[in-house]
Amino acid sequence: FVSNGVYLLTNQIVVNKGVVLRSWSNGDTAPGTTILDGNNYAGKPVTNRVALMDHAQAVLDGFAVQGGIGRGGGVMIARSGMITNCIISNNLATNSTYGGGVATIGSGCDVGVITHCRVVSNATDTGGGGMFISSYCTGIVEHCIIEYNSSCVNSSASGGGGVYGGPWNTNLVFRWCTIAHNTAA
């Protein structure tokens, strides 16, 4: 459990065991008041994403995830995991990387489940301002709001302002989501 507050990170949080990382405020999850901040700003010598999920039973529950930079600036899913009840906003993927808010690594990954999240106001200079899902990935994205994200901020290289995925994502399911007001070059 992580108490409410703002946590300015110096490195990414790595969840590589079957644990639940959950915000906690007065007996409930608190995504509005428990903030994991990548602490990235102009002129900072070291930049990092906020969280890396790298286990099938890893869970990130009830956080505001912001200020991350890199592929999957907010959250990178390496193998699998669950992201639930999170607000993923104001993250950035730069230098021809994908997925400002959320990204997956490599083909054949298991996205797991992303549920009841808001993925808002993230950006990338390539593709998938809100989410980038690698080719051949499986998983479920449900009950999410993906809006006001943008891709190709400084180029015309790709697309998918809200969501961008490889052409072979045949086992990836989006259901009961709102994907709106996203932009791409």
Image (cartoon, rainbow, N blue to C red):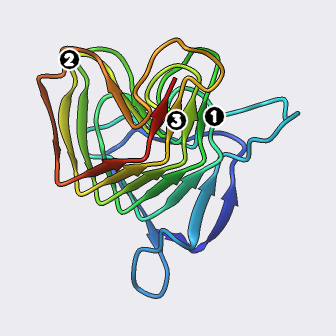
The earlier-in-sequence mark between 3 and 1 is 1
Q: How far apart are marks 3 and 1 (CA)?
A: 14 Å
Q: In this view, does 134 lie above or below 15?
A: above
The earlier-in-sequence mark between 2 and 3 is 2
Q: How far apart are marks 2 and 3 (CA)?
A: 23 Å
Can residue 73 be seen here?
A: no
Q: Where is residue 12 in the image (x, y as percent from the top left)?
A: 60, 40
Q: Mark 3 points at which residue?
A: 150
Please name whichever residue, 176 or 2, is drawn nearer the observer in this view of the structure.
Answer: 176
Residue 175 placement, left or right of 34: left
Q: Which amino acid does label 3 sit on?
A: Ser
Please name whichever residue, 21 or 6, is drawn nearer the observer in this view of the structure.
Answer: 6
Q: Name the residue under label 2.
A: 136
Q: Mark 1 points at which residue?
A: 69
The mark closer to the camera, 2 or 3, is 3
Q: How far apart are marks 1 and 2 (CA)?
A: 25 Å
Q: Position of residue 63 (x, y in %)?
A: 48, 62
As drawn, which residue projects farthest toward the left? Answer: 171
Q: 10 Å neighbourhood of mark 1: few (<14), some, or many (≥20)?
A: many
Please name whichever residue, 152 or 140, is drawn nearer the observer in this view of the structure.
Answer: 152
Q: Where is residue 181 in the image (x, y as percent from the top left)?
A: 43, 47
The earlier-in-sequence mark between 1 and 2 is 1
Q: Is residue 158 above or below residue 78?
A: above
Q: Residue at x 43, y 22 (%)?
A: 159
Q: 10 Å neighbourhood of mark 2: few (<14), some, or many (≥20)?
A: some
Q: What residue type is labelled 1?
A: Ile
